[in-house]
Image: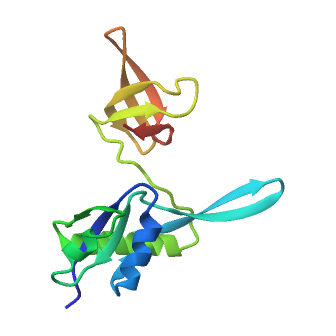
Amino acid sequence: MEAPWYVAHTRPRAEKKVAEYFRQEGWITELPLYASLKVYRGKRVTFYKTLFPGYLFVRLPEGQVPRARQNQHVAQILVPPDQAEFAGQLEAILAALNGEREIRVAPAVLVGKSVRIIQGPLRGVEGVVVERMGVLEVVLRLDFIAQGAAVRVAADELELI
């Protein structure tokens, strides 16, 4: 039987360090990365960024959770409530990363979540998701002087706060 999956919540920008430590311990580790291309003075440079900043996935043998927590870059070890569902979802994400399609994090922009607009003329405005319509459009409640105002904003122009 395979060891169960755990989610290691790391300190900021420490995912790769923790992944290397876990691999040195002999534990199966998955750190989903995606390629990010930047152009500097005509040079094309590819960086590999973590798909889920602050998280990596590890199979820990019985009794090894305390040892995993001892790493100074690990903030917390989380236990997925449904191992089969988690394993299936992780497998699907890893398969998508191995494909030829572009992939990026899709924040859970759900009704009731607080968000900030990150692009366009309303950049910096904060609100609460009131309604979600389709894949890319949400309606926000923006509290201007204790009044409500609805505005349609593409989901990729939002960040969770």
Which of the two residues, 23 or 118, is positioned nearer the viewer here? 23
Which of the two residues, 75 or 80, is positioned nearer the viewer here? 75
122 is higher (above) or lower (below) than 74? above
Which of the two residues, 98 or 36, is positioned nearer the viewer here? 36
Horizontal side, residue 32 vs residue 91: left or right: right
**Residue occupying the far bottom of the picture:** 1
The residue sitting at 40% across, 42% down in the picture is 134
Q: Toward which corner of the image does residue 84 lie, by quadrant?
A: bottom left
Residue 42, image x, y percentages: 83, 56
**Residue 31 appears in the picture as rendered:** no
86 is higher (above) or lower (below) than 124? below
Quadrant location, the N terminus: bottom left
Q: State the colouring used for the structure image.
A: rainbow
30 is higher (above) or lower (below) than 133? below
In the rendered picture of this protein, how many numbered marks are placed on residues?
Answer: 0
Q: Toward which corner of the image does residue 12 lie, by quadrant?
A: bottom left
The residue sitting at 41% across, 73% down in the picture is 19
Residue 36, image x, y percentages: 62, 60
144 is higher (above) or lower (below) than 54? above
Residue 10, image x, y percentages: 35, 61
The residue sitting at 36% across, 75% down in the picture is 91
Quadrant location, the C terminus: top left
Residue 124, image x, y percentages: 49, 27
**Residue 71 appears in the picture as rendered:** yes
The residue sitting at 52% across, 24% down in the picture is 122
**Residue occupying the far right of the picture:** 42
